[in-house]
Amino acid sequence: MQKVQFSALVLIGLLAGCASTQKVLDKPPTEVFRSEKSVKEVTFCLSDKNHTPALERDDGSRVVLIKNGYGGVSLAFSIFPDGTGSRIEYRKQFGTIGGIWKQCIGLKDDK
């Protein structure tokens, strides 16, 4: 019985440490990219490769969240219209992710 209680407490502690969506989106971007691809193209690619839906915002931007196994947001991509292309703000909270998302963006760092 004690072992079960301890495991439950550890799990609760891990979940409490997970980043909320707004906390991650309020952070300054880790990196900013510009792409010739439209907001819709970049969003579809990020959503498709990560098997996650995108959130549409009233200003025309989109957000794609990559979550860990506990539901915490580990990465967030905010995609904004930029002329005929898009500006992508990448925010990393924790964890690692493969580089497949870079195929969706395909352009230089905006630093």
Image (tube, helix red, strand yellow):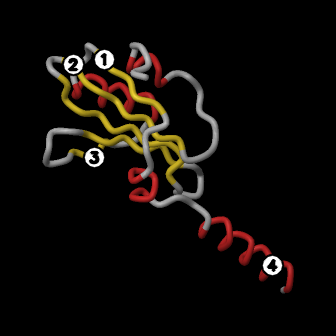
Distance of label 1 from label 2 (alpha carbons): 6 Å
Distance of label 4 from label 1 (alpha carbons): 48 Å
On screen, residue 69 above or below 2: above
Distance of label 3 from label 2 (alpha carbons): 19 Å
Residue 108 x, y percent position in the rendering: 42, 14
Distance of label 4 from label 3 (alpha carbons): 37 Å
Describe residue 68's horizontal placement relative to residue 107 as left or right: right
Q: Are marks 1 and 2 in contact (CB under 8 Å)?
A: yes
Identify the mark nearer the N-term, 1 or 3: 1
Quadrant of res 22: bottom left
Identify the mark nearer the N-term, 4 or 3: 4
Q: Which residue is mark 2?
A: 85
Question: Amino acid type of disc 2?
Answer: Gly
Question: Amino acid type of disc 4?
Answer: Phe
Circle nearer the viewer, 3 or 2: 2
Circle nearer the viewer, 1 or 3: 1
On screen, residue 50 above or below 56: above
Identify the mark nearer the N-term, 4 or 1: 4
